[in-house]
Structures are given as structure tokens and as C-alpha cells.
């Protein structure tokens, strides 16, 4: 049987997995709202982000409470501190999904994304969702291989982001400046979302192996 | 005389103030590099970000070490945990200054920012620098009034950001898509930089007053 300390630590882990699930779902739905110009769906994503924020605060309070009551040291201490950081990563991911939904709402009844970019944005949205789902799995299983895979998956996001820019900077771009601005911001939201998923996975790698992957710096333009 | 615990806490505080100074200087120099298309200056900002990252890691390690050795509770515990967060905010601010410098480098020998936007970007850069300088002061002095002022100062950044967008979306925009993309990203970097400065100040307010300013959500599009 596990002691109260480890039970509480498990509960915090479960909370993080739940946050990953929520923000993955939010990013998936935000992408659909963006591409389909679905106002109701966009509104629901925006409203649901409160739940992510609430969970973040709850986990923070539990982690700090655990530090105060149990005064962990060494690895146990690192786990709690790392949980605080993962919670912050996931909370910020939720904000980014909300940003995508707000862009959908802003341009309703139009879609902020022109038709010829739909497939790239759809891929970015789906990849973002897969990345954070994998990050959630990594939190749950401490699977270092899956965590390292996540970094490679992120290369795919960089590739999609470059694809988006090559559309934007193509001489045949005829969607005007406002759409270029929207697409630029949108691309950045997906990219940052992916960065946070990778960051979560890296933190797990560090906890399990004790090795700081210092060579990893999420690099965006 | 202060005990070892509080001396160490003061040292962490000093480190945070130093980080704020470094990232403020970086953002100021990045802005100059951007407007003057100064490659050497841009390179120096990019290289100097390593120092901010190193300081961040050092402060993290000291804070975790303090938690392990001293096992603080209540307010003392909150101070250490909050220091970790402020360090993360400032580390990210350094990244954003580096992003601005990288944009300057990318477009060299041209300036990424067209002449008619120079004054707006200059103002954003200067305001960003003032905001993080004030955040540094707030860390050093625990001055709640100054911290609350910072939120109002941030409204000015939002105003400048809107001004930037109105230029971008003006029918007379004739700088093409690439420049629109650059200016969009640039605007976002300054805005996020300001958000992190405000976030630092809010954390100090919470530490001093114990009140979570939950109504405050840094809102960006």
C-alpha cells in the first residue's frame, strides 16, 4: 500500500494527465471551430478554459501544500517542483487553444483561414492534439522513449509551420494582410502549444533519468 | 543579523533583479538592432541570452536546494515557489528579446520594420524595457503600488499593439506580406514580454498581500 504522501503525489499526476486531456480536446475543438467558422464551438472552447485554469490552481495549491506538510527532499522534491512547472505548461497550452478559438470568433461568420490553407492548419491542429496526448501519456507512464519521440514529432510541427510561411510568402498570396496576420498568429499558437507539450515531456525525462536535456531549446522565430 | 536562510533568500531575490536588468537591456538593444538593422548588436543580444538562461538555472537550483535544506513552510515556502515562477517569467522574457534580435538578423541588411512603423516599435521597445525595469524594482522593494501601476502601464502596450495592427490593416499598407508577418510576430513578442513583466509584479502583490488577483488574466489575441 502506498503512503499518504505518494497517494497525494499520484493525485497530482492524475490532475496533470486530466489537464493534458482537456487542453488537447480544447485545441482539437478550437481548430474545428476555426476551419468551420463554428461560433458556438468557439465559444465553448473559450468558456471551457476556465476549467483548465481552475485545475491548474488546484494542482498548484496541492503541490505547495504537499511541500509544506511533507517537506520532501531529493527526488521527491524534484517531482513536486516539476509538477508545478508541468501544470504551468499545460495551463499556458489551454490559453493558446483559447486564442485559436478567439480568432475563430473574431472572424465569424467567415473562417479566419483561407480554404487553401485548411489542410495545413488541420494537420497542425491534429498534430498539436497528438503531441499533448502523448505528453499526457508520458506523465502517466514515465515512458522516456515516448518522451524522446515527442521531440521528433515536434519537428513535424516545425515543418508544417514552414509550409504555412511558404504559403504566406508565395507571390500568389491573394488573401490580403488581415488574413496574413491571422494566419501568422495562428501558426505561432500551434507552434507554442507544441513547444509546451515537448517541454512537459522533457521534464519527465529529467525526472526519470536525472539528465537535463540542455541541448533542447524550443526554438521559434 | 539575518540568518542563513534569509540571506540565501535575499541572494535569490538579487538574482531575479539581475535577470530583470539583463532582459530589459536585451530588449532595448534588440529593438535598436531591429530598427537600425545592426547585425553585430543583434548577434550580441542572441549570444547574451545564454547568460540569462544560466542565471535562471542557477536560481532554480538554489531555490530547490533551499527547499530541500531548510524546508520552509507558509509564507517562506510561498516566497521560494514564487521565485521559481518569476525566474521562469524572466527567462521567457529573455527568449522574446532574442526573438526580436533574430528577426533583425534575419532581415539584415534591411530593417524588418518599415520606416513608418519605427516610432511605434521604438515606443513598444522602450515601454517593454520600462515595464521590466519596474518589475525588477518591485522584486527588490516589494512595492505593491508600483506593482499595481505596472498593470496600468501594460494598457499602454495594448494601445501600441492596436496601433501597430491599425497600420498593418490600413488599406494603404504597401510593404507586402513578409513585412506584415514580421511586424505581426514582433508585436506579439513585445506584448508577451510585457505580459511576463506584469506577471512578475502580480506574483509580488500576491506574496505581500496574500490576495490572488484572479480577475487579472493577461489577455492577448
Image (spheres, coloured by chain):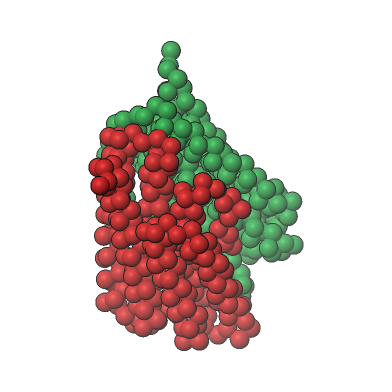
Chain colours: A red, B green
Relative to the observer, which residue lies in front, A23 or B172? A23
Question: Can you say whether A87 is above or below A109 in the image?
Answer: above
Q: Residue at x 48, y 64 (%)?
A: A146
Instruction: State which quadrant residue A151 falls in.
Output: bottom right
Query: x, y percentage for residue B89?
Result: 46, 46
Residue ranking furthest to the top: B1
Q: Is residue A196 visible?
A: no
Query: x, y percentage for residue A185?
Result: 48, 68
Relative to the observer, which residue lies in front, B98 or A144? A144
Question: Can you say whether B98 is above or below B60 in the image?
Answer: below
Q: Is residue B77 visible?
A: yes
Query: x, y percentage for residue B19?
Result: 54, 39
**In this image, A197 relative to B114: left or right?**
left
**In this image, B144 relative to A184: left or right?**
left
Q: Residue at x 30, y 61 (%)?
A: A18
Q: Residue at x 43, y 51 (%)?
A: B195
Query: x, y percentage for residue A59?
Result: 30, 49
Where does the C terminus of chain B fall, quadrant-wise? bottom left
Instruction: State which quadrant residue A138 falls in.
Output: bottom left
Where does the N terminus of chain B fall, quadrant-wise? top left
Residue ranking furthest to the front: A1
Relative to the observer, which residue lies in front, A216 or A34? A216
Q: Residue at x 49, y 33 (%)?
A: B62
How many numbered badges does the structure rendering display?
Answer: 0
Amino acid at each position: 500500500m502506498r503512503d499518504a504522501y505518494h497517494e497525494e503525489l499520484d493525485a497530482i499526476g492524475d490532475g496533470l494527465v486530466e489537464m493534458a486531456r482537456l487542453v488537447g480536446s480544447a485545441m482539437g475543438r478550437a481548430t474545428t471551430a476555426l476551419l468551420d467558422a463554428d461560433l458556438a464551438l468557439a465559444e465553448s472552447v473559450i468558456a471551457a478554459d476556465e476549467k483548465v485554469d481552475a485545475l491548474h490552481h488546484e494542482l498548484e495549491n496541492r503541490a505547495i501544500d504537499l511541500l509544506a506538510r511533507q517537506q520532501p527532499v531529493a527526488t521527491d522534491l524534484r517531482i513536486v517542483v516539476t509538477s508545478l512547472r508541468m501544470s504551468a505548461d499545460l495551463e499556458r497550452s489551454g490559453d493558446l487553444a483559447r486564442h485559436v478559438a478567439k480568432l475563430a470568433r473574431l472572424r465569424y461568420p467567415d473562417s479566419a483561414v483561407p480554404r487553401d490553407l485548411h489542410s495545413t492548419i488541420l494537420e497542425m491542429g491534429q498534430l498539436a492534439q497528438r503531441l499533448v496526448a502523448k505528453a499526457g501519456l508520458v506523465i502517466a507512464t514515465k515512458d522516456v522513449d515516448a518522451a524522446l519521440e515527442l521531440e521528433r514529432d515536434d519537428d513535424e510541427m516545425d515543418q508544417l509551420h514552414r509550409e504555412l510561411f511558404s504559403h504566406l510568402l508565395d507571390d500568389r498570396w491573394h488573401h490580403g494582410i488581415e488574413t496574413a496576420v491571422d494566419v501568422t498568429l495562428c501558426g505561432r499558437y500551434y507552434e507554442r502549444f507544441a513547444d509546451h507539450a515537448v517541454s512537459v515531456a522533457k521534464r519527465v525525462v529529467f525526472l526519470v533519468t536525472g539528465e537535463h536535456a540542455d541541448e533542447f531549446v524550443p526554438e521559434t522565430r
